[in-house]
Amino acid sequence: MDVAVRIDTRGALCPMPILELAKAMRALAPGTLVELVSTDRGLEADLPAWCQATGNPLVRMERREALYVGWVRKAG
């Protein structure tokens, strides 16, 4: 995937990964692909819910051992 922005929130707990994502998204152009990396298992539920609430498409979500990685495209 052609990721434009990577947000690494390893070690941060809810709600910080989503707050960091929301903060970064405000400054991005529509269509930008963002990769969010977290160790917070709550991201599996939180990221799809945030995407649905904000209209930013969730491109993919996966688990890599202790990491949760999600890709979100900025709506617009």
Image (cartoon, rainbow, N blue to C red):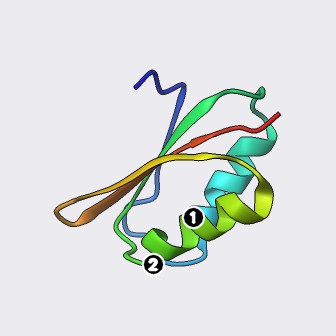
- Compared to residue 72, the image places residue 63 above or below, namely below
Point 47% across, 70% down: residue: 43
Q: Which residue is mark 1?
A: 48
- Compared to residue 76, the image places residue 15 above or below, namely below
Q: Nearer the viewer, residue 44 or 23?
A: 44
Mark 2 or 1: in front is 1
Q: Is residue 19 visible?
A: no
- Compared to residue 14, the image places residue 11 above or below, namely above
Three-letter code for the amino acid on which mark 2 is drawn: Gly
Q: Secondary structure at mark 1?
A: helix
- Answer left or right for 30 relative to 33: right
Q: Which residue is mark 2?
A: 42
Q: Position of residue 52 (x, y in %)?
A: 70, 62
Point 40% across, 73% down: residue: 40
Q: Position of residue 46 (x, y in %)?
A: 56, 72
Tell which residue pokes out farthest to the top in this image. 2
**Which numbered marker is on residue 6?**
none
- Compared to residue 47, the image places residue 3 above or below, namely above
* Quadrant showing the C terminus: top right
Tell which residue pokes out farthest to the left in this image. 65
Q: Position of residue 13 (x, y in %)?
A: 48, 77
Point 80% across, 43% down: residue: 26
Q: Nearer the viewer, residue 23 or 73?
A: 73
- Answer left or right for 6 relative to 20: left
Point 72% across, 43% down: residue: 25
Nearer-N-terminus badge (2/1): 2
Determine which quarter of the picture holds residue 54: bottom right
Rate crowding at label 2 as few (under 14), some (14 to 19) or many (20 or more) other CA atoms within 10 Å. some
Q: Is residue 34 visible?
A: yes
